[in-house]
Image: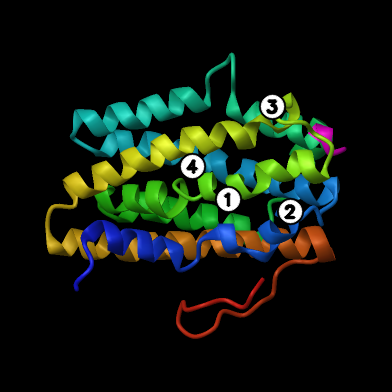
Amino acid sequence: MAKTFREQLIAGRDEHHSKNHPYIDLWANGRLTKAHMAVYVVQHYHFVSDYLNWMLYVAALTPHRDVKEFMLENFSEEEDPNNRHIDMLFDFAAACGTPKESFLAAPVLPNTQALCDWGWRQVYEKPWQVVVAGMFIGLESQPPDIYRRIVPAFAQHYGWPAGAREVRFFAEHIEADTMHGARGFAIVEKYCDGPDLQQQAVAQVKQAALMRWRHMNGIYWNALHGRVDDTPPVGDGGAESSA
């Protein structure tokens, strides 16, 4: 039986879902140090800082009020001065022994920079509907499944009880990104209203998930081995090695 459009989008994302990355396996099983975990939030900060600007760019491109409202609401939630999500990253890193000064001085890893550069190229060149598919299905729908693996580990292995302020970023984004991902699916299904846009959207989701997996590769090799990721891709954009 042929897959529905939604099923194709989900399958495209899940080919390289970062919940299955070896770095997340180590984290969930209590085998990362706090210094290792800090590398993740530093690199996530660099990625998400650009992601917020992609949302504003899409809001400017789309002619549809519901899409504009979603982008602006999402941005406002992220930048709420009373609960700024980027500040949660600073707090977690500080609890891991990386103060804000060191956090901001840390270099952007090559795979993180590649993800950011790729994202900008997409918003400049692709139809906005396709961009939304990559952003909200290929990227933002992933963290709830990733963080559901991580959050229990904070109490089980790392000494932070459930609800601890230091780890609130991860728990809050299970809920927030579940909602954002669901709205992203709804927008893509509504506005990718022909076979060409649907085909582009599925391809975009696959590429977004692969770019995020490679971003995780960079974090893995830097955190655990102190070097950049030089893992060659297998085939033409096909499956990566395990890390």
What kind of residue is marked 4? Tyr
On screen, residue 73 above or below 146: above
Q: Is residue 174 magenta?
A: no
- Could you tell which of marks 3 and 2 lies nearer the N-terminus? 2
Give the numbered dot on residue 163.
3
State how far apart marks 1 and 2 are (Cα): 10 Å
Mark 4 or 2: the one toward you: 2
Chain part drawn in magenta: 94-98
Badge 2 is on which residue? Answer: 27
Q: Majority secondary structure of the magenta segment?
A: loop
Q: Dot 3: few (<14), some (14–19), or many (≥20) neighbours within 10 Å?
A: few
The residue depicted at 40 percent of the width and 48 percent of the height is 135
On screen, residue 221 above or below 154: below
The residue depicted at 66 percent of the width and 29 percent of the height is 168
What kind of residue is marked 2? Trp
- Could you tell which of marks 3 and 4 lies nearer the N-terminus? 4
Mark 4 or 1: the one toward you: 1
Give the numbered dot on residue 146.
1
Q: Secondary structure at mark 3?
A: loop
State how far apart marks 3 and 2 are (Cα): 18 Å
Badge 4 is on which residue? Answer: 51
Q: Secondary structure at mark 2?
A: helix
State how far apart marks 4 and 2 are (Cα): 24 Å
What kind of residue is marked 1? Ile
Give the numbered dot on residue 205.
none
State how far apart marks 3 and 4 are (Cα): 27 Å
What kind of residue is marked 3? Gly
